[in-house]
Amino acid sequence: MTFLQLVRREMEGSLGRLVFVSAMGGVSTTALIGAINAGAGAADKGEISLWAAGFFIAALLLFIQAQHFILITTTAEIGAIIHKMRVRLLDFVRRSELLPLETIGRAEIVSAITGDTAILTQASNMLAFAVQGALLIALVTAYVAYLSFVAFVLSVVIVGTGAAIFHSKTKQHAADMREAAGWENRLYDRLSDVLDGFKEVRLNRARSDALFDHLVDVSRTAANIKIRTQSETYRRMVLLQTSLYILLGAVAFVVPLFSMSPGSVTKAVTALVFIVGACSGLVQSIPIIAAANAAADRLAQLEVKLAGITSLSDDVPAEPAKSFSKIEVRDVEFHYPGKTADVPFKVGPFNFTLNSGDLVILVGGNGSGKSTFMKILAGFYRPASGELLLDGTPVVGDRYEQYRSLITAIFPDFHLFQRLYGIDDPNPAELNAMLAEYKLQEKTRLTHGEFRTTELSSGQRRRLALIVAQLEKRPLLMLDEWAADQDPEFRRKFYFEFLPALHRAGITVVAISHDDRYIDEMDVPIRRLRMDEGRFTEIGSVETG
């Protein structure tokens, strides 16, 4: 999809009106040329043409009004289009399924929503100039045809040949731009490695050097592709500009051989100088428009990808489910698609029943499939086979959205939001009591719906996340290795105070843990399920208490 096609699809204002005013801009410029030629012709005879002067003033006023309208309207329309696309893409992202979203990758999404939209913003005025320049060229060419048919034919042949050669490699240019964007996304991933893994990089010089060398290679490859692409563009630009000067020379030196009057030659050359100016503007805009075309194409492709993985439809009720009686996992299997390993990681089959009010703890070694099962149970991963049931009804299609409205979860890669999004008017007394219980009252507080700070230690951040999860008031809480970053005091509190309190409050809890010693000492009824190699190895529940 090109930039112009994107504008035509997304534009909310009157495209016909904008094209009409652009045409008036071209007409006014052509009228200025005619008035100047008429005034110059009269001056050659020692006369002053008042009608030409009046015509010039009228054309100039029309030109000023047309330019103001075109540039301001184009800026406003492109800005509105970019805002609309950003909002739509972000809406798709928030309603996407986790696994395919992970396949698309953060780099492509961030690059499109921030970088590509910025490119379109830069190209907005250039697009207006390009469209107006094309109209001007058409009108001035008609004026040249009026002055001399031979000059008109030469104009069409020479400029047409140059344009054809210029556009002969357009598809290859677009492919090179897409390849360059792919390498830019890889560069973003490596930059994320440097920033997210800064401590690991700083501690290990060998890792730092190897990562830096890889980053340099990726950056060099991206730069070389861009240099090659832009160099080819500039070569074609020089060719097109050369064809314009050849045209001027042909009209000045060749057309007179066909008995064109000297005055007509001067007028034709003057008119063609305007074409050269307009074409030069078009040529200079080519790299920007080409970059905008590539950006528009990437945005359109990303939108198609995201639209294909969006699960929420308009008929899903906005009001979340408040309670449940039973969740069942029947013969569920799952595997990660698209993995390069010889043996893709698979989990299942699972048969599992979760009753309201249960306290379930999953144990097992690293890589045994606990977190994957948790994501299946949370509705993030869809079963490859088997079924997930909520109160006896299969959870399929858009029912997943309502199913997930029962759940709040804290995963190892959780994100702690500064603002309490989706939690309206939390009870201040309840929040302050939990902050005190979790020993965070001196670290942060809630002001105008925002925490004063979330820059806390890892264990403190998990405690604050657990407070936020409880404020959501959802019946099912999932915790993946919550106690892993806690000090001994809060690790004991988690098993002997927090979990029992949640159980007494009627909250259903599914937690992943490696702390068998603490689990053995708990004095509340729990179900402990052990996993190994993607399966439950201890199917029966273990009652403690």
Image: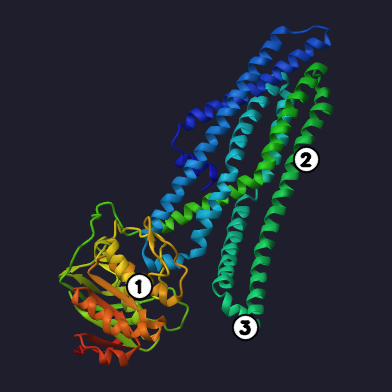
The quarter of the displayed image where residue 322 is located: bottom left
In the image: residue 339, left or right of residue 498: right
**What amino acid type should be assigned to the residue bearing mark 2?**
Thr
The quarter of the displayed image where residue 278 is located: top right
Secondary structure under the numbered disc 2 in the rendered image: helix
Q: Is residue 173 above or below residue 136?
A: below
Q: Which residue is mark 2?
A: 242
Tell me residue 360's x, y (percent). 24, 82
Tell me residue 514's x, y (percent). 35, 88
In the image: residue 157, left or right of residue 484: right
Tell me residue 175's x, y (percent). 59, 57
Q: Residue 410, labelled with which disc? A: 1
Q: Residue at x 55, y 33 (%)?
A: 72
Res 245 visible? yes
Q: Nearer the viewer, mark 1 or mark 2?
A: 1
Distance between the Cα atoms at labels 3 and 2?
Answer: 56 Å
Q: Which residue is mark 3?
A: 204
Secondary structure under the numbered disc 1 in the rendered image: strand
Determine crowd level at label 3: few under 14, some 14-19, many 20+ residues with C-alpha closer than 10 A.
few
